[in-house]
Amino acid sequence: MPDPDRIEGAAKNMGGKVKEAAGKVTGDEKLKAEGRADQVEGKVQNAVGGLKDTLRDDNRH
C-alpha cells in the first residue's frame, strides 16, 4: 500500500490543477496562483511519500 503522503500529495496536485483551471476560466489570478502553489506542494508531498515507500521496501529485503 502506498504511503499516505503519496495519496495526499496526488490529491493536492489534482486539486491544484482544478483551482488553476477555475482561475483561468474566471480570470482570477489569485486562484490561479493558489492552484499552482497547491500543485507544487502536492508534488513535493508525493515525492516524500515515494521516498518513504522506497525506504520501507528496501528494509523488507
Image (tube, rainbow, N blue to C red):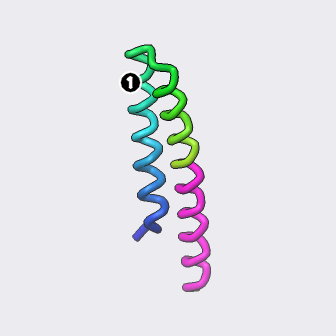
Who's the residue at 56% across and 47% down the image? 41
Q: Residues within 10 Å of mark 1 (few under 14, many from 20)?
A: some
Place of residue 7 in the rendered image (x, y in percent of width and height, measured from the top left) = 42, 58
Residue 51 placement: quadrant: bottom right
Question: Compared with residue 20, is residue 12 higher up or lower down, i.e. above or below?
Answer: below
Under circle 1, the secondary element is helix
Place of residue 13 in the rendered image (x, y in percent of width and height, measured from the top left) = 47, 43
Who's the residue at 56% across and 78% down the image? 56
In this picture, residue 26 sits left or right of residue 35: left
Q: Main secondary structure of the magenta part?
A: helix
Place of residue 27 in the rendered image (x, y in percent of width and height, measured from the top left) = 44, 14
Q: Amino acid at mark 1?
A: Ala
Q: Which residue is mark 1?
A: 22
Place of residue 42 in the rendered image (x, y in percent of width and height, measured from the top left) = 51, 49
Q: Which residues are magenta?
A: 43-61
Who's the residue at 51% across and 26% down the image? 30
Question: Compared with residue 2, is residue 60 higher up or lower down, i.e. above or below?
Answer: below
Who's the residue at 48% across and 62% down the image? 5
Quarter of the figure that contains the C terminus: bottom right
Residue 58 placement: quadrant: bottom right
State the residue in front, 7 or 56: 7
